[in-house]
Image (cartoon, rainbow, N blue to C red):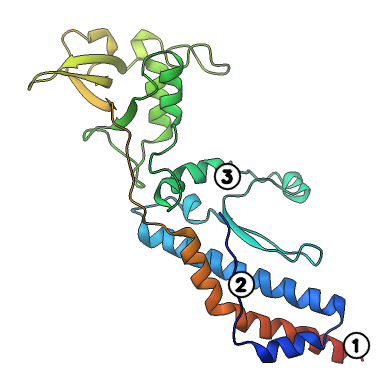
Amino acid sequence: MSASIELRGVEEIQRKLNALSGPEMKTAIRNTLNDTAFDARKALSDSIGSIFDRPTPLIVKSPYVNKATKDTLEASVQIGKDSMSMTELIAGKKLVDAGVFRRALEPHIPGFSSTRAEKGMEYHLRRLGMMRNDQYLMPSRTMKLDRYGNVPGSVASKMLADIGAYAGVAGFPGTTKERKAQYVWGTVKARKGGTVTGIWKVKGGARRMTDARWDLMMLVVDRAPHYRKVFDFNKIGLEAGRKVIVQHASKAVDFVLGRRRMAA
């Protein structure tokens, strides 16, 4: 996911650049690239906030700038940060896997698959053969989602533990004790014919499965969810960059020239 910006109509800046020494020119180019990349990142973050319905703060902030140095003279913007610096590690900062952000956003970006990647709940259910690889898990209309429109993580973990989907996974109980279980995995006959398979919440607890009310929480579907291409990552980033790169180049050159005059 990368693109380049071509500069046009910047003869005056080019003239100034030609007057710089090698190290000065590298400094000016580095500063231009970084300032432009950070403006592109802001445009992408703003677009995420306006295009998507209630994105989480982490998703909004997921565009990340790989800064240019005087050695590389190359800056880029990507979704998510792949690694941490030693300073960040020592400071104990937590890094969210860049793949988390890419799995969430790429189905909406032109050039990527319209089908979302496997979610955590689907992984565990497929691993145990409870779902086929061509089946997907979707929240039902009765599933209470968080303010961002997602299944709360604590609820997802509780559902998986109750139905025994964590069996064999280190650090997780194989299943919840029956007296504390609220969710069950099952297939129920639908009123209009056919069956419905998924995770159900049993009112009164799983010990009363036969005479309690079952509410569908997560539904198994055979058709992969597809998403509209509403987030044109490259186009948004490039348009934002083109608007400001000349301004940043002029500022960077003036900064270097000013520093030269002060040193004289």
Front residue of this view, candidates 142 and 62: 62
> Residue 62: percent from the left, percent from the top?
53, 53
Q: Residue at x 31, y 18 (%)?
A: 183
> Residue 131: percent from the left, percent from the top?
36, 18
Tell me which amino acid carries mark 3: Ala
Tell me which amino acid carries mark 1: Ala
Whole-Å distance between the Cαs marked 2 and 3? 22 Å
| Label 1 packing within 10 angstroms: few (<14), some (14-19), many (20+) | few
Please report whichever mark, 3 or 1, sits nearer to the chain's N-terminal start: 3
| Label 3 packing within 10 angstroms: few (<14), some (14-19), many (20+) | some
Check disc 1 and report its element: helix, strand or loop.
helix
- Say the numbered circle drawn on residue 263: 1
- Say the numbered circle drawn on residue 98: 3
Label pair 1/2, CB-CB below 8 angstroms? no
> Residue 190: percent from the left, percent from the top?
12, 20
Asked if residue 130 is positioned above or below residue 242 in the image, the reply reads above
For residue 76, what is the image quadrant? Answer: bottom right
Check disc 3 and report its element: helix, strand or loop.
helix
Q: Mark 2 points at which residue?
A: 36
Front residue of this view, candidates 221 and 171: 221
The quarter of the picture where the N terminus appears is bottom right
Check disc 2 and report its element: helix, strand or loop.
helix
Q: Residue at x 41, y 46 (%)?
A: 107
